[in-house]
Image (cartoon, helix red, strand yellow):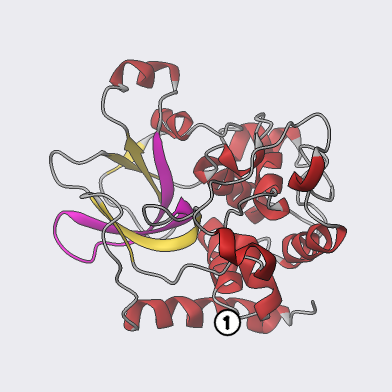
């Protein structure tokens, strides 16, 4: 895959503009969430198993058909290498949205969505930005995606994509320890972002933190289940438009999508934080 870097962000922005002007509205995933961008397809040989759960696998050794093919690993590596760096984290995230929309070729679209049966090498590689070793696509990966985008935005070379967390993706140059400490939470827990300083005036590219009910006691330890994603806009009172990973519909595997989530009282919204 050869991408003209001068056109890359233009393509990504065009893809987002298309999403914002074209109706992809779906049934709300919960009373608090509504996906508004298109769900990327699965690989052709997995399409008939769309209702199956994401593929589990043991991190320490390849097991049966759960390992992605060499071609799938290679495609994921190409996508990662061609992702923008030295830009804002939201522009990195928007690049992956454009990949899922087909801006760089139909063959790359399935890589921004969880798969049944075997692990998706792109999603697995996002955990290179954390200390977590994923259990296939079943490990919640919204925070891994946000952290990877934060670190990639501060990369200085094309191959600075992080070391593979296992056998299911191709390693690049690992992220510097200083950047892991300074610009990320180095964790796959969405709760790790609860300890970042909040802002009452979010701007495009800031981070939105949601917390599941009953997890308040974990906040002081920067833990707890929930969701974390990038802020795009406030489309209407009590709602926020976000771009993030592991966002989908009930019964569908998670993907990198644009969604709208409720922020009004009684929702799971916690706060906005500034991206680093």
Quadrant of the rendered image containing residue 268? top left
Residue depicted at 83% across the width and 32% down the height: 61
Quadrant of the rendered image containing residue 212? top left
Quadrant of the rendered image containing residue 240? bottom left
Locate residue 119, reporting x and y percent.
69, 48
> Is residue 57 in view?
yes
For the N terminus, give its image quadrant. Answer: bottom right
Locate residue 125, reporting x and y percent.
71, 47
Please tell me whether residue 177 is drawn above or below residue 45 in the rendered image.
Answer: above
> Is residue 163 in view?
no
SS majority, magenta: strand
Crowd tier of the residue under label 1, counting other residues whose Cα lies within 10 Å: few below 14, some 14–19, many 20 or above = some
Query: What are the residue bounds of the magenta stretch?
Result: 226-247
Please tell me whether residue 78 is drawn above or below residue 118 in the rendered image.
Answer: below
Locate residue 118, reporting x and y percent.
70, 49
Name the residue tied to disc 1. Answer: 11
Judged left or right of residue 195, residue 140 is right
Return the residue found at the far front.
48
Residue depicted at 40% across the width and 30% down the height: 225
Residue depicted at 41% across the width and 53% down the height: 251
Q: Nearer the viewer, residue 235 or 156?
A: 235
Q: Secondary structure under badge 1?
A: helix
Residue depicted at 43% across the width and 16% down the height: 221
């Amino acid at each position: 895959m050869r991408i003209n870097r001068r056109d890359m962000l233009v393509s990504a922005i065009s893809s987002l503009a298309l999403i914002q002007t074209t109706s992809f509205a779906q049934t709300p995933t919960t009373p608090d969430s509504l996906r508004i961008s298109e769900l990327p397809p699965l690989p052709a040989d997995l399409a008939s198993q769309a209702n199956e759960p994401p593929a589990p696998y043991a991190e320490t050794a390849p097991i049966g058909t759960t390992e992605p093919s060499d071609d799938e690993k290679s495609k994921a590596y190409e996508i990662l290498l061609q992702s923008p760096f030295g830009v804002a984290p939201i522009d990195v995230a928007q690049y992956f949205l454009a990949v899922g929309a087909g801006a760089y070729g139909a063959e790359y679209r399935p890589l921004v969505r969880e798969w049944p049966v075997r692990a998706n090498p792109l999603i697995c590689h996002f955990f290179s930005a954390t200390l977590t070793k994923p259990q296939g696509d079943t490990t919640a990966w919204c925070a891994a995606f946000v952290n990877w985008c934060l670190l990639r935005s501060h990369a200085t070379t094309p191959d600075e994509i992080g070391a593979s967390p296992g056998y299911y993706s191709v390693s690049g140059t690992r992220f510097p320890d200083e950047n892991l400490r300074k610009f990320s939470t180095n964790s796959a827990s969405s709760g790790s972002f609860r300890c970042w300083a909040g802002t009452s005036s979010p701007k495009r590219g800031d981070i939105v933190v949601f917390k599941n009910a009953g997890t308040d006691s974990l906040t002081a330890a920067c833990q707890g289940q929930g969701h974390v994603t990038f802020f795009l806009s406030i489309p209407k009172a009590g709602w926020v438009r976000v771009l993030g990973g592991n966002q989908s519909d009930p019964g569908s595997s998670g993907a990198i999508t644009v969604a709208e989530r409720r922020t009004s009282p009684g929702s799971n919204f916690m706060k906005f934080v500034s991206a680093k």
